[in-house]
Image (spheres, rainbow, N blue to C red):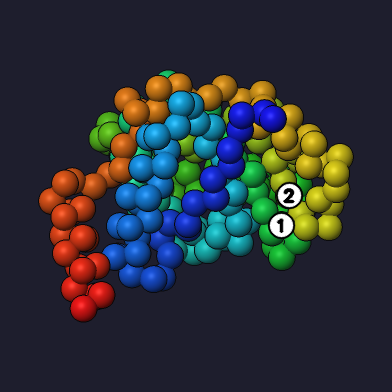
Amino acid sequence: GSGVTLYDTPGVNDTNGSEVEIANCVAIGNVLSACESVKIIWLIDARKIVAAKAARCTGMRKFLQLFGQFVHPIDPHVKSMIVIFTHLETTSFKSWEDIYDEIQELYEVMSMSSDSDSDKVIKAVFLHWVDSLEKYKNNLLLRQEDFTVDRRNKLLGLIEGTPSIPGTERVINPPLSETVIAQLGEACQYMKN
């Protein structure tokens, strides 16, 4: 009915190795660039926020830099992204204010000082997360125990109300060169033999 397809992508920065990471990037990029329009929904495990801070944000920085290569330029499209924080029941976070404060601290830890493209992406994404938390408050927090039909419908309404990124073939690009894709193909062929 609605013409909406949800595509659950593999995780980024997983522990399965760079070959899996590259294959995931290619697959995600191919699917997204084939769509007429896209809304990006990030489900962020709240436990990862605590871990990111402990690791001085190196993994988060890498992820956001990679994301900035997928969606370029970021500024006109950041409003087409929704962030939902999950697994709060396993953390000390009790409200949107707790997540908000932690995101602000992460932003400070990352302390970007340059005007590089990757720092612009990080700044845009963090500011969007902060703005979203201020606007939607606890509606962006998802605990397993409070995932009811009413809650699901509110989240779906939030997703429907978010603008799409149109013309994704011009915006979404897998951050890999043709050479890297060819090398990946050769590596996969080698593994099959």
Residue 57 visible in image: no
Q: Secondary structure at mark 2?
A: strand
**Is 119 positioned to the left or the right of 103 in the image?**
left
Q: Of marks 2 and 1, which one's residue comes earlier in the chain?
A: 1
Q: The C terminus appears in which quarter of the rendering? A: bottom left
| Residue that label 2 marks | 142
Q: Quadrant of residue 120?
A: top left
Residues at circles 2 and 1 in contact by the CB criterion of under 8 Å: yes
Q: The N terminus appears in which quarter of the rendering? A: top right
The location of residue 72, given as percent across then percent down, is 33, 30
Q: Amino acid at mark 1?
A: Leu
Q: Quadrant of residue 74?
A: top left
Number of the label disc, if any, that sits on residue 61 = none
| Residue that label 1 marks | 88
Residue at 78% over, 58% down: 144
**Is 61 positioned to the left or the right of 94 in the image?**
left
The location of residue 125, given as percent across then percent down, is 47, 36
Residue 107 visible in image: yes
